[in-house]
Image (spheres, rainbow, N blue to C red):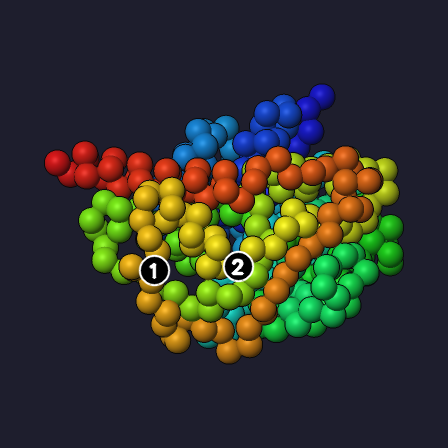
Amino acid sequence: MSKTALITGVTGQDGAYLSQFLLGKGYKVIGMARRSSHSENMLHRLKWLGVEKDVEIVDGNLGDLSALSRLVRTVKPDEVYNLGAQSFVGLSWDQPIQTAQDTGVGVLNVLEAVRLERPEARVYQASSSEMYGLIQQPMQTEATPFYPRSPYAVAKLFGHWMTVNYRESFGMHASSGILFNHESPLRGLEFVTRKVTDGAARIKLGLAKELRMGNMEAKRDWGHARDYVKAMWMMLQQEVADDYVIATGVTTTVREMVDLAFNHVDLDPEDFLVEDPRFMRPAEVDVLLGDPAKAKANLGWAPETTLSEMIVEMVEADLERYRSAARSSG
């Protein structure tokens, strides 16, 4: 019999790629999404991957424990992937309370709903490398102390420790993936990689003349979301639940990432870049570099897509978006 997976945050980047992956494994996929008057727009990532008709979308809200409990009772999932959150770090300073509710307390609600209604289900929690913040070790492992530097990271840390607590207190099969930055053509425009690839595409096509950026020297460990959702699934196939760093083990500056995008379209980024203090964070995370050794040893997981390959894929997707829009309007 096929398994049933419940995915919160199914309309996001990771939710879309995970849906595609699980459908390929023969799962029945049920995606929870917040009701919206723009529901057609909401499914655009699933449509991009051609799976929107194969995912059953149900209404839900991470802030409503009673609704979550009813949903889990009705769906009877074998696996629950909690990807729902207010996921933009920059916005969390402007909306700290909403971020705490969605990204922090929302995790507790999911865990409690599963504990009450479907304790045998396996749970994946989307933790974040942002929890390391002001890094305490040059390369971050599962044992590296956390030092969150944003309301988003603090909320993620609450959800992470709640997952550990429910695993240890109630014997739940609950695992956290401490995912480092992972991107794709489905990334939102508010994230720096997509901002860059979209900017390079617009400038190449004559639709823009500059790209305004914040801290160009920040370093990140960037991988492809398509590779990272596979790791989520692998965690829930293990006999024993645990926490895993999912990363490439390579760190790159924002400036170097910008170079990759602009070089692909034969442009010199220095001709178009404008450093804008408005995009500086109140408390910056300067470097993130993950050590995926445990995931490699225990799960057999390794990233398959290089940063260069990913950036090229993203630039090409953005070029095609604008060309397609021009064809439609012309």
Residue of label 1: 270
Rounded to the nearest angstrom, the CA distance separating label 1 from label 2 is 15 Å
| Sequence order check, earlier mark of 1 and 2 | 2
Q: Nearer the viewer, mark 1 or mark 2?
A: 1
Q: Is residue 226 left or right of residue 45?
A: right
> Is residue 153 toward the left or the right of residue 162 in the image?
left
Please say whether residue 217 is visible from this viewpoint. yes
Of the pair 307 and 94, the residue shown nearer to us:
307
Mark 1 Cα-neighbour bin, 10 Å: few <14, some 14–19, many ≥20: few
Q: Residue furthest left?
A: 330
> Quarter-wise, where is residue 236 in the image?
top right
Secondary element at image label 1: helix
Q: Which residue is mark 2?
A: 253
Q: For the residue marked with disc 1, what is the amino acid?
A: Glu
- List x then y, in percent, for residue 107: 66, 58
Measured as percent of width and height from the top left, residue 202 is found at 27, 49
- The image shows residue 87 at horizontal and vertical percentages of 53, 59
Q: Which residue is pictured at 69% across the width and 38% down the height? A: 302
Q: Amino acid at mark 2?
A: Thr
